[in-house]
C-alpha cells in the first residue's frame, strides 16, 4: 500500500499574520538610509530585490547585512516556488510505501525525510522545495522526533495509546488533517494517537479520526492488525478556563503537553502565560516547548527559571537545542525589516517538574 504526500497551499501554515512579500520589500524605504527609492534604484546583487535607493547604499547593505539579504532572497524564492507548477508536481508525484506494522522509521533531517518520498534529485537538491516541505510538516515532525523523550518521561513508552495536549494551538490547529498521519508512520507501535488542540485561536470542530489503512485483498495477512489511528479533538478557549478544564477532566489524562512557539518569556506575553505555565509545570507532565529563535528560547528558559520558587526545581529532559525539524522558511516582519528573521519551531526543550 502506498501513500501520497499531499499538501494543500502549505505556505500559509507556518506564516506569521503579517507576512513578508517581495512587493512590500521593494515599496519600503531604503533599508540603509531610510530614503525614498525610485524605479532607477539598483537591484541588490545579494537579495535580487530593490532594497536600497542608490549604489552606495546597496554596497553598504551588502557589506553590513549580507546574511539578512540572503534571507530576503530565500523568501522571494520560496514565494515564487510555492506559486509554481513545480510545487504542485512535487507533492502530487512523491510517494512512499507505508511501513510494516511495528517497523519504526527514523530520520534526522528534512533531506532524509524527503528521501522517504522520492529519490529524484530535482527535489532533493532544490532548497525551496525543502523549505516548502519543512514549513508544512514542522509541527508534526517536531512532535514525532521528540515523542520518545516525552513518553519515557511520562512512563508511557510501552502504552499503545499516546495522549498529547497541544496548548495555545494556532497554525497547527488549522493545518490539513492528513499531515498528522506522520505520527503513526514514525511510531507504528503506537495503536492510537489522541491529540487535543486547545487555544483561543482553535476552530470549534468535532473530533476527527483518521481512517485505519485497509490492506488490499491480495496482501498477505499480518501477524498484528494495522488499525493505527490519529484522533484529533479541538477545544476553543484557554487551558485554564472553566469550560476547557471541564472538557479536559472528562478525558483520560495526557501523557505529555506541547507548546509550539508560545513565547512564554516574550515581554508582551509573559504575564498572560505565567499562570498557565505554572499550572502545566505543577501537573508533573513532561512539556515540549519550541521557540522561534535562540533569543526567543533564552527568554523562555528565563521565564521557566522564575517559576522555580513557585513550582520547585525543574528537570530539562532535552536540554535547550536547535531543532532538526524546524521550519527552514524564514519569517520576516514587514514592520521590522531589519530585525533578525525567525523560524517556526527553531529551538526546542523538554522540561518537567523534578520528581
Image (cartoon, rainbow, N blue to C red):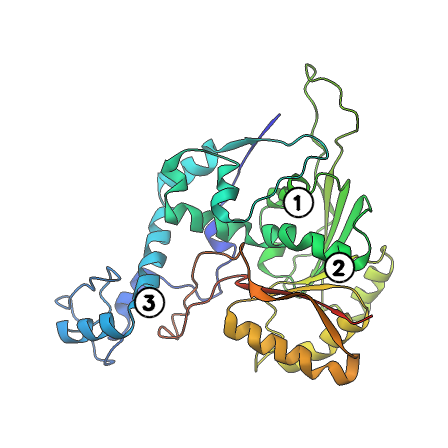
Q: Earlier in the sequence, mark 3 or mark 1?
A: 3
Q: Which residue is mark 1?
A: 183
Separation (CA) of disc 3 from disc 2: 37 Å
Instruction: Provide residue 14's location: percent of width, then percent of height.
Output: 51, 57
Q: Residues within 10 Å of mark 1 (few under 14, many from 20)?
A: many
Separation (CA) of disc 2 from disc 1: 15 Å
Quarter that holds the N terminus? top right
- The answer to whether the residues at label 3 and label 1 have Cβ atoms under 8 Å apart is no
Q: Is residue 290 above or below residue 125?
A: below
Q: Residue at x 84, y 58 (%)?
A: 253
Which of the 4 image quadrants contains residue 60? bottom left
Q: Secondary structure at mark 2?
A: strand
| Residue 82 appears anywhere in the view | no
Q: Which residue is mark 3?
A: 67
Q: Residues within 10 Å of mark 3 (few under 14, many from 20)?
A: some
Quarter that holds the C terminus? bottom right
Q: Residues within 10 Å of mark 2 (few under 14, many from 20)?
A: many
Instruction: Provide residue 128's location: percent of width, then percent of height.
Output: 38, 49
Q: Secondary structure at mark 3?
A: helix
Q: Secondary structure at mark 1?
A: helix
Furthest-top residue in this view: 218
Disc number placed over residue 256 in the picture, else none: 2
Q: Is residue 181 above or below residue 262?
A: above
Which of the 4 image quadrants contains residue 213? top right
Q: Residue at x 52, y 43 (%)?
A: 113
Looking at the image, is mark 3 or mark 1 nearer the viewer? 3
Q: How many marks?
A: 3
Q: Earlier in the sequence, mark 2 or mark 1?
A: 1
Amino acid at each position: 500500500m502506498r501513500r501520497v504526500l499531499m499538501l494543500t497551499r502549505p505556505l500559509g501554515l507556518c506564516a506569521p499574520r503579517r507576512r513578508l512579500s517581495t512587493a512590500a520589500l521593494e515599496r519600503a524605504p531604503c533599508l540603509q538610509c531610510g530614503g525614498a527609492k525610485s524605479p532607477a534604484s539598483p537591484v541588490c546583487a545579494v537579495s535580487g530585490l530593490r532594497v536600497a535607493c542608490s549604489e552606495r547604499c546597496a554596497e553598504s547593505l551588502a557589506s553590513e547585512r549580507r546574511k539578512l539579504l540572503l534571507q530576503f532572497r530565500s523568501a522571494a524564492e520560496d514565494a515564487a516556488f510555492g506559486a509554481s507548477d513545480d510545487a504542485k508536481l512535487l507533492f502530487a508525484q512523491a510517494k512512499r510505501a507505508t511501513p510494516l506494522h511495528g517497523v519504526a522509521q527514523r530520520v534526522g533531517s528534512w533531506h532524509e525525510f524527503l528521501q522517504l518520498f522520492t529519490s529524484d534529485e530535482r527535489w532533493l537538491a532544490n532548497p525551496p522545495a525543502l523549505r516548502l516541505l519543512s514549513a508544512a510538516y514542522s509541527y508534526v515532525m517536531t512532535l514525532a522526533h521528540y515523542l520518545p523523550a516525552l513518553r519515557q518521561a511520562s512512563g508511557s513508552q510501552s502504552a499503545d495509546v499516546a495522549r498529547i495536549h497541544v496548548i495555545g494551538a494556532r497554525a497547527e490547529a488549522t493545518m490539513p488533517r492528513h499531515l498528522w498521519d506522520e505520527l503513526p508512520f514514525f511510531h507504528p507501535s503506537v495503536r492510537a494517537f489522541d491529540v487535543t488542540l486547545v487555544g483561543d485561536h482553535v476552530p470549534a470542530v468535532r473530533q476527527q479520526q483518521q481512517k485505519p489503512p485497509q490492506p488490499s485483498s491480495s496482501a498477505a495477512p499480518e501477524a498484528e492488525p494495522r488499525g493505527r489511528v490519529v484522533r484529533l479533538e479541538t477545544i476553543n478557549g484557554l487551558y485554564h478556563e472553566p469550560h476547557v478544564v471541564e472538557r479536559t477532566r472528562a478525558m483520560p489524562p495526557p501523557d505529555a503537553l506541547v507548546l509550539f512557539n508560545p513565547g512564554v518569556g516574550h515581554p508582551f506575553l509573559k504575564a498572560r502565560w505565567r499562570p498557565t505555565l505554572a499550572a502545566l509545570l505543577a501537573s508533573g507532565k513532561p512539556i515540549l516547548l519550541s521557540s522561534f529563535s535562540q533569543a526567543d528560547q533564552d527568554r523562555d528558559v528565563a521565564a521557566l527559571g522564575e517559576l522555580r520558587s513557585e513550582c520547585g526545581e525543574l528537570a530539562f529532559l532535552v536540554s535547550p537545542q536547535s531543532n532538526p525539524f524546524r521550519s527552514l522558511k524564514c519569517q520576516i516582519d514587514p514592520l521590522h525589516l531589519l530585525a533578525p528573521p525567525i523560524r517556526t519551531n527553531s529551538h526546542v526543550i523538554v522540561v518537567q517538574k523534578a520528581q
